[in-house]
Image (spheres, rainbow, N blue to C red):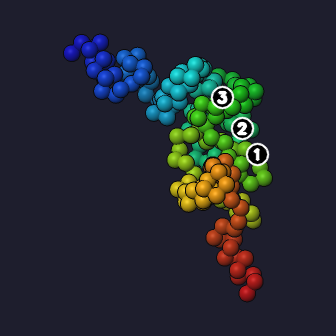
Amino acid sequence: MHVAYQLLRLSRDKLDPWGPYTACMERLRPVGFSPAIIRAEQRIRESGGRLTASRRRILEILEQQREHVTAEGLVQLLQGGTPSIHRSTIYRALEEFERYGIVVHTHVGHGAVEYHLGTEPGHAHAVCERCGTVLDLDEAKFEDLGAELLSSCGFQLHPGHVALVGLCAACAEDNASRTE
């Protein structure tokens, strides 16, 4: 089958707004590019932005992290790497990624703002005020509260940006044993 025909067919099957170009580029990408990075690149390009080598590296580091990371944490992870990425570039990239909906920031406890890829399922956070443990909570748990706030006062809840503070199970158990 002719390559151009294959690309057009792929484009039609996927209903891809970029048409044959995207199908061709996906075939030509190096193996290390994940679907999350590819989607991020498409979103940036659709918004008129560019994905430079530095920005791509920032996204790759964010994707590799099991935990949320602060901007300073990213600076530490990227220092000495190739390409060399300046601190201000990291901060500007995070702001831009957030504007495009690629990265989400969260205020966890009293520390610095933490970032993670927006491709993760929506979640809120619970922080233990004693030991600092952070738990991810499914945003679906806040649907009833969000509906109540919306109907009673017109407030739209976005629980992923803040953390609930309390005691984790271990600290709560320790606290209960001390009071007995």
Q: Residues within 10 Å of mark 1 (few under 14, many from 20)?
A: some
Q: Nearer the viewer, mark 1 or mark 3?
A: 3
Looking at the image, tell me whether mark 2 or mark 3 is earlier in sequence order: 2
Looking at the image, tell me whether mark 2 or mark 1 is earlier in sequence order: 2
Q: Residue 150: image x %, image y %?
A: 61, 53
Residue at figure coordinates x 50%, y 25% from the top left: 42
Kindly indicate whether the residue at mark 3 contacts the one at mark 2 (C-beta within 8 angstroms).
no
Extreme residue in the left direction:
1
Toward which corner of the image does residue 166 lie, by quadrant? bottom right
- The label shown at residue 71 is 2
Q: Nearer the viewer, mark 2 or mark 3?
A: 3
Extreme residue in the bottom direction:
180
Q: Which residue lies under the disc numbered 3?
A: 96
In whole angstroms, how far apart are the C-alphas of marks 2 and 1? Answer: 8 Å
Q: Which residue lies under the disc numbered 1?
A: 112
Q: Residue 41: image x %, image y %?
A: 52, 26
In whole angstroms, how far apart are the C-alphas of marks 1 and 3? Answer: 18 Å
Residue at figure coordinates x 67%, y 48% from the top left: 161
Kindly indicate whether the residue at mark 1 contacts the one at mark 2 (C-beta within 8 angstroms).
yes
Toward which corner of the image does residue 44 lie, by quadrant? top right
Q: Residue 29: image x %, image y %?
A: 44, 22
The amino acid pointed to by label 2 is Ala
- On screen, residue 151 versus residue 175, left or right, reads left
- The label shown at residue 150 is none
Quadrant showing the C terminus = bottom right
The amino acid pointed to by label 1 is Ala
Residue at figure coordinates x 49%, y 30% from the top left: 39
Along the line of sight, which residue is nearer the eye, 146 or 151?
A: 151
Looking at the image, tell me whether mark 1 or mark 3 is earlier in sequence order: 3
> Callout 1: helix, strand or loop?
loop
- On screen, residue 2 versus residue 74, left or right, reads left
Along the line of sight, which residue is nearer the eye, 110 or 75?
A: 110
